[in-house]
Image (cartoon, rainbow, N blue to C red):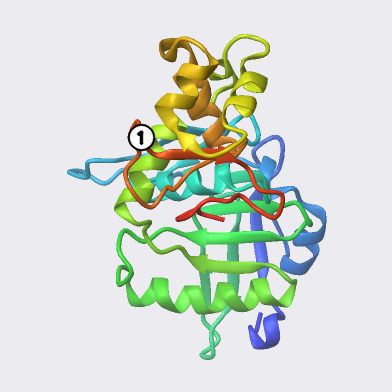
């Protein structure tokens, strides 16, 4: 399994009955829906760490995604809101290869994300840009090569800006369909914010803010409405319609 030009990589994943399968990486990438698979190995629980393994409910898929850290959870949050993403999974595949000395090496990327065009992203989520052992950095080079060979991508996702991360966490609390509110409320919001205006003014124009604000945040999460996400959200922040050319947001994640 020599890693020259992406050849020789192998994939290990779990089949529907939980048995490990090893397959040529290029073949598995074509045939396997990694976004539907459970973790090939459990996320480690590190004593003393504030955040440990858990689950993220994905608004994109309506299913839970396994997470291993707060840094990963925030990156999943951003990907879950990305309109290009159609599927998400935590640690669904292990890659195997031989290094230049002939030694077998392996790595399990933390995140798998499927895009609308059928390509995919494998990613890891360091807690800060310089985090990672020599093994992790060497693996990043190999996995980048493996993904490039099949037209996919691998990234070590940099931590999000604090304001953006805080805003996404807030909006994520309203990502479930129940936050959309009563029938007709979304249409009323789109009309109220047909032109950019302060959040509280548009909410009051659509009805009782106590009822309307959760639906506003739901619409912002789903990009039906847009606002700046690189500064803290507040009642006077300008909220407007989604532009035809894109999200219309500053500080967005896509």
Q: Residue at x 53, y 35 (%)?
A: 220
Quarter location, residue 178: top right
Left or right: 74, with 189 as reference point: left
Viewed as shown, does residue 247 lie left or right of 25?
A: left
Crowd band around label 1 with a 10 angstrom C-alpha radius: few (<14), some (14–19), many (20+): few
Q: Nearer the viewer, residue 247 or 107?
A: 247
Q: Residue at x 44, y 25 (%)?
A: 201
Q: How many marks?
A: 1
Query: Which picture quadrant has residue 1?
Result: bottom right
Of residues 24 and 232, the one nearer the viewer is 232
Residue 14, percent across and down? 65, 45
- Is the residue 173 above or below the residue 228 in the image? above
Judge from the rendering whether residue 78 lies leftward or rightward of residue 8; answer left or right: left
Inspect this view and state whether residue 202 appears. Answer: yes
Q: Position of residue 167 (x, y in %)?
A: 38, 41
> Residue 187, percent across and down?
67, 21
Which residue matches tag 1? 236
Q: Is residue 215 above or below residue 88?
A: above
Q: Secondary structure at mark 1?
A: loop
Query: Residue 33 versus residue 102: which sits nearer the camera?
Result: 33
Q: Is residue 222 left or right of residue 41?
A: right
In this view of the protein, which residue sits in the foreground, 4 or 170? Answer: 170
- Would residue 175 be visible to someone looking at this image? no
Q: Could you tell me residue 244's position as x and y percent?
A: 71, 49
Residue in the image at 48% along x and 74% along y: 139
Q: Residue at x 69, y 34 (%)?
A: 17
Quarter the C terminus occupies: bottom right
């Amino acid at each position: 399994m020599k890693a020259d030009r992406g050849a020789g990589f192998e994939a290990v994943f779990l089949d529907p009955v939980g048995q490990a399968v090893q397959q040529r990486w290029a073949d598995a990438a074509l045939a396997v829906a990694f976004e539907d698979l459970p973790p090939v190995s459990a996320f480690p629980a590190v004593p003393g760490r504030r955040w440990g393994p858990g689950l993220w409910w994905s608004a994109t898929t309506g299913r839970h995604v396994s997470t291993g850290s707060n840094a990963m959870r925030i990156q999943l949050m951003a990907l879950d809101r990305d309109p290009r993403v159609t599927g998400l999974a935590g640690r669904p595949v292990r890659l195997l290869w031989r290094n230049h000395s002939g030694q077998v090496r392996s790595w399990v990327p933390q995140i798998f994300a499927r895009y609308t065009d059928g390509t995919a992203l494998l990613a890891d989520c360091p807690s800060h840009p310089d985090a990672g052992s020599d093994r992790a950095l060497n693996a990043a080079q190999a996995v980048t090569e493996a993904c490039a060979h099949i037209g996919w991508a691998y990234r070590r996702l940099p931590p999000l800006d604090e304001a953006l991360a805080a805003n996404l966490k807030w909006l994520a609390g309203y990502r479930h369909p129940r936050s959309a509110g009563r029938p007709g409320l979304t249409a009323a919001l789109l009309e109220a914010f047909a032109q950019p205006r302060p959040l509280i003014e548009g909410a009051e124009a659509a009805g009782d803010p106590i009822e309307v604000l959760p639906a506003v945040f739901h619409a912002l999460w789903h990009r039906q409405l847009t606002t700046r996400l690189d500064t803290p959200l507040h009642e006077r922040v300008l909220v407007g319609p989604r532009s035809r050319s894109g999200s219309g947001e500053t500080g967005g994640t896509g």
